[in-house]
Image (tube, coloured by chain):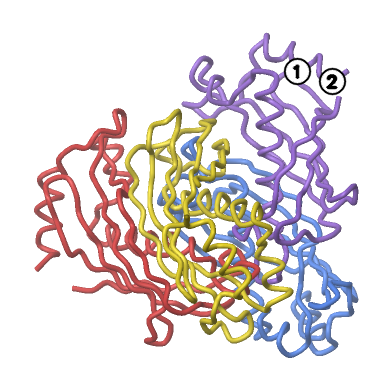
Chain colours: A red, B blue, C purple, D yellow
Amino acid sequence: MTFKYSLRVYFEDTDAGGIVYYGNYLKFMERARSEWFLQQSIGMKSLMEDHEMVFVVSRTELDYLRSAKLEDVLEISTELTELKRVSAVFKQTVTRNGEVLCQGTTKVGCVNTITLKPCAIPSEVHAQLNQLMR
Amino acid sequence: MTFKYSLRVYFEDTDAGGIVYYGNYLKFMERARSEWFLQQSIGMKSLMEDHEMVFVVSRTELDYLRSAKLEDVLEISTELTELKRVSAVFKQTVTRNGEVLCQGTTKVGCVNTITLKPCAIPSEVHAQLNQLMR
Amino acid sequence: MTFKYSLRVYFEDTDAGGIVYYGNYLKFMERARSEWFLQQSIGMKSLMEDHEMVFVVSRTELDYLRSAKLEDVLEISTELTELKRVSAVFKQTVTRNGEVLCQGTTKVGCVNTITLKPCAIPSEVHAQLNQLMR
Amino acid sequence: MTFKYSLRVYFEDTDAGGIVYYGNYLKFMERARSEWFLQQSIGMKSLMEDHEMVFVVSRTELDYLRSAKLEDVLEISTELTELKRVSAVFKQTVTRNGEVLCQGTTKVGCVNTITLKPCAIPSEVHAQLNQLMR
């Protein structure tokens, strides 16, 4: 169950090395995860408003293998690879014409928006995510 | 001849005020202008590689009227409103469901990529842009 | 009463043109205005927490005259040039060794953090700002 | 031999969760590494101009433990923990009043600016870095 998201590289994404600034891959991956969540009708906005909860990133691990350039079209694949009571792990890969540029994992944890303390993922959201693991 | 580009607001675009960070509208407008140029087959990358030229922004003027929020879908309209020998002006408007959030103009100038000095827009590009003014 | 703030240009600030991305001057100017406010003991955080108010940017007008490069040290001057009941205008200039790279004005308006509607600048803050006009 | 760099959190650094956007810690750490390199008189700009080389990030691994807020003053410590022929690893920690908010490692590799292929760190730079390991 791999979800694909694609985007184009603009000037804002690049740096003086003439390539995509490595820090921006985190943004690209988040855009893809956001669309993945929204496709399941799990928006962060509704989580925040209805449940006073939000998923925050607690760990990122990325390998930058090849560089992307201005106007490149990149594709980002997103897979949920781990699901626990308060956290989840996504594996994501950024490719250009099938060639892997960057890959990594992002761990997100469910926290209360007021206290910022960890809390259990709401049960209906958890059940829904659990189905996407299979 | 108005060109429409649309995007979704992600966490990266927002700030602690809970709204889209005003500085990011410049990025949104640039994404729209980039797609506008690419639709005419005028990519900045090919301008740089084939002509050693690039359009750089020389003036921006923006009014922020209403705020956008996380997960909003925004639409950006782009119109070329002025064309001279070395420069061009775009008028752009960001709307959400038809409501204007931000509008402004961006002046771009053609410069040599090595010297960064102003230079005339290549004649075939100028002719092409000129048609889009009508 | 001109306030000076200085910063160094890092990779994050640059783009594939090899120069500072024009959109980032808005960030540089905001850093300088933030320090200007904090020097007067007017932090946005305390405004938000104590008064449920915040200054939001309602208009920006910038001219980009020369480009800055990686590792350049830039200096930003900040002056309050207009003060009304709900808004204020700042004039800011970014220089490198005295040479003007970018200059412009930023209009900020006081809004309620909940409703995002305009509201009068708190009287003690207004009085304090008024002194800085002279 | 730990190097300290400090910065203040501005609106540009935050997101709609009211905290520093996790992706921005990569920028904070890079600012600290840049100043660390410059303190040794190893600027990326001179590496690029004199040696046609640049250090690019090949791997990042970060844990986000606590969140930072608007106007917080953060301190970033930087240590070189590994040095090879073409690569180096830095360990960095972001703290606020001694409390650890984020920590991680960044691996950088030396590449030729034209080919973007890995190349040996120039011997005098390598010798200099080697001294900083002790």
Q: Relative to the observer, which residue lies in front, A70 or A104? A: A104
Measuring from the top left, give residue C93's x and y in whole percent: 83, 43
* Residue at point 78%, 41% (across, down): C76
Q: Say which residue label 2 marks.
A: C133
Q: How many marks?
A: 2
**Residue type at the position of mark 1:** Leu
Q: What chain letter is assigned to the residue under label 1?
A: C
* Residue at point 41%, 87% (across, down): A97
Q: Say which residue label 1 marks.
A: C129
* Residue at point 75%, 18% (across, down): C129
Marks 2,1: beta carbons within 8 A: yes
- Give the answer, above or below, for where C60 lies relative to B59: above
Measuring from the top left, give residue B25's x and y in whole percent: 61, 53
* Residue at point 42%, 63% (across, down): D82
Label 2: few (<14), some or many (≥20) within 10 Å?
Answer: few
Q: What chain letter is assigned to the residue under label 2?
A: C
